[in-house]
């Protein structure tokens, strides 16, 4: 068996024909000192970061000796590395990852936009609604669908602004849409992108 640390910090284990995964795990544990020593020399890993809308965000810390799923990006594709004993389907893992990312990104984005536009909001919830992208209560509590992350940032911002405007106009009257247009001039085109996509 052979170990190799690649340029981007990935650890590669080369197994001779006939070797089992369990034998490789024991080999890794035996070589843990060597691995940690050489990994520490590499300061700039890219395999535990993702590029999301031109922002670098940490989504996971990886442990070489713990069996867990790994999410990474390469050439604009999400790569999910799955342990051998995984029972979840890749589609299920993607949904879990999307929910987790949405809870962080959407809360931060709502907080920023509401602050910039001087809206005083209540609680922010991220859910998986089946019939709507977002909602606003009379108390200023906001709820957003995690599937919004399937859209580009401008569309997400429109939905956030839409719900913020409901804090002043709890309806879809001309006055409401004028308010949306004040904060989001291109809302009509952005709204069209949402149509035809069920949440």
Image (tube, rainbow, N blue to C red):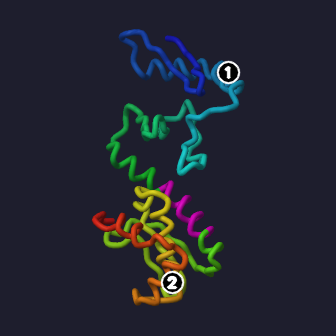
Q: Quadrant of residue 121?
A: bottom right
> Magenta segment: does it hold 111?
yes
Q: Eyeballing the image, is 39 above or below 92?
A: above
Residue 82 position, x and y percent, is 41, 36
Is 174 or 4 nearer to us in this picture? 174
Q: Residue at x 44, y 53 (%)?
A: 98
Location of the C terminus (image quadrant):
bottom left
Q: Secondary structure at mark 2?
A: helix
Mark toward the start of the polypeptide (2 vs 1):
1
Q: Which residues are magenta?
A: 100-112
Q: Which mark is residue 144?
A: none
Residue 88 appears in the picture as rendered? no
* Residue density around tag 1, few if under 14, some if 14–19, many if 20 or more, within 10 Å: few
Residue identifier under label 2: 179
Residue 145 position, x and y percent, is 42, 66
Residue depth check, mark 2 versus mark 1: number of the one nearer the observer? 2
Is 3 or 133 nearer to us in this picture? 133
Does the magenta stretch mainly form a helix, a strand or a loop?
Answer: helix
Residue 190 position, x and y percent, is 41, 67
Q: Residue at x 54, y 83 (%)?
A: 140
Residue 39 position, x and y percent, is 66, 25
Residue identifier under label 1: 38
- Label 2 vs label 1: CA separation? 57 Å
Residue 60 appears in the picture as rendered? yes
Q: Quadrant of residue 130?
A: bottom left
Q: Residue at x 45, y 64 (%)?
A: 155
Q: Secondary structure at mark 1?
A: helix
Q: Eyeballing the image, is 134 above or below 78?
A: below
> Magenta segment: does it hold 175?
no
């Amino acid at each position: 068996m052979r170990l190799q640390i690649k340029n981007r910090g990935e650890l590669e284990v080369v197994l001779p024909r006939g070797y089992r995964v369990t034998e490789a795990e024991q080999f890794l544990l035996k070589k843990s000192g060597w691995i940690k020593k050489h990994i520490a020399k590499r300061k700039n890993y890219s395999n535990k970061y993702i590029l999301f809308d031109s922002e670098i965000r940490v989504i996971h810390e990886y442990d070489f000796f713990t069996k867990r799923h790994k999410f990474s990006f390469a050439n604009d594709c999400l790569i999910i590395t799955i342990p051998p004993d995984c029972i979840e389907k890749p589609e299920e893992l993607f949904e879990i990852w999307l929910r987790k990312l949405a809870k962080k990104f959407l809360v931060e984005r709502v907080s920023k936009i509401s602050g910039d536009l001087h809206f005083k909001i209540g609680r922010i919830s991220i859910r998986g609604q089946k019939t709507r992208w977002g909602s606003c209560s009379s108390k200023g509590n906001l709820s957003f669908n995690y599937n919004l992350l399937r859209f580009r940032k401008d569309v997400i911002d429109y939905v956030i602004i839409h719900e913020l405007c409901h804090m002043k106009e709890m309806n879809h009257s001309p006055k409401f849409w004028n308010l949306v247009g004040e904060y989001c001039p291109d809302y009509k085109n952005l709204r069209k992108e949402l149509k035809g996509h069920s949440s």
